[in-house]
Image (spheres, rainbow, N blue to C red):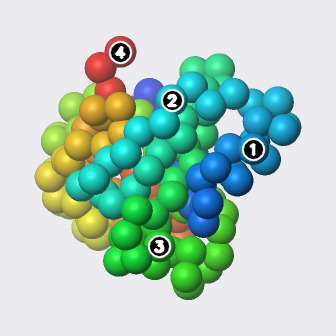
Amino acid sequence: MIWMFKRIDHVGIAVKNLEEAIKIWEGLGFKVEEIEEVPDQKVKVAVIKVGENRIELLEATTEDSPIAKFIEKRGEGIHHLAIRVENIESKLEELKQKGYKLIDEKPRVGAGGAKIAFIHPKSVTGVLLELCERKE
């Protein structure tokens, strides 16, 4: 079964220092709409809206968070691409049946209360792909 993506939801960018990153992005003319901490993911998120899409600046809140590990290994930069979907649970089941390696077999809560789940980069040409279901 072929399933359609709704659109790109956001690009997640790992940063060492959120305040400094905000200054840089605001200097480019972008505006941070909100800042939120997501304790479950050990991350602080600054949301920049760009039309219907978002850029999420991601700062680790603990040394053992996925963002801290990413920065330690690769430095600051693009961490993931998030695609907006409907019925994330069925999408995950479909991908699992097709043999994709899932980081999350069940959705969890992400920034803004979205249901999210990640697909392993080894299954997606080296890209960490996030499925994201939001209430419109």
Judged by depth in the image, the label closer to the viewer, 4 or 3, is: 3
Q: Quadrant of residue 88?
A: top left
Residue type at mark 3: give it.
Ala
The circle on residue 136 is 4
Q: CA distance from mark 2 to mark 4?
A: 17 Å
The circle on residue 23 is 1
Q: Position of residue 106 (x, y in %)?
A: 15, 52
Q: Position of residue 118 (x, y in %)?
A: 33, 57
Label 4 SS:
loop
> In percent of the image, x 61 and y 60: which residue is there?
17
Q: Position of residue 7 (x, y in %)?
A: 50, 30
3 and 1 marks in contact (CB < 8 Å): no
Judged by depth in the image, the label closer to the viewer, 2 or 4, is: 2
1 and 2 marks in contact (CB < 8 Å): no
Residue 11 visible, this orientation: yes
Residue 3 visible, this orientation: no
Q: Quadrant of residue 116?
A: top left
Q: Which residue is mark 2?
A: 34
Which sits earlier in the primary sequence, circle 3 or circle 2?
2
> In percent of the image, x 65 and y 20: which residue is there?
51
Quadrant of the image containing the N terminus:
top left
Q: CA distance from mark 3 to mark 2?
A: 21 Å
Dot 2: few (<14), some (14–19), or many (≥20) neighbours within 10 Å?
few
Dot 1: few (<14), some (14–19), or many (≥20) neighbours within 10 Å?
some
Residue type at mark 4: give it.
Glu
> In percent of the image, x 17 and y 40: which residue is there?
90
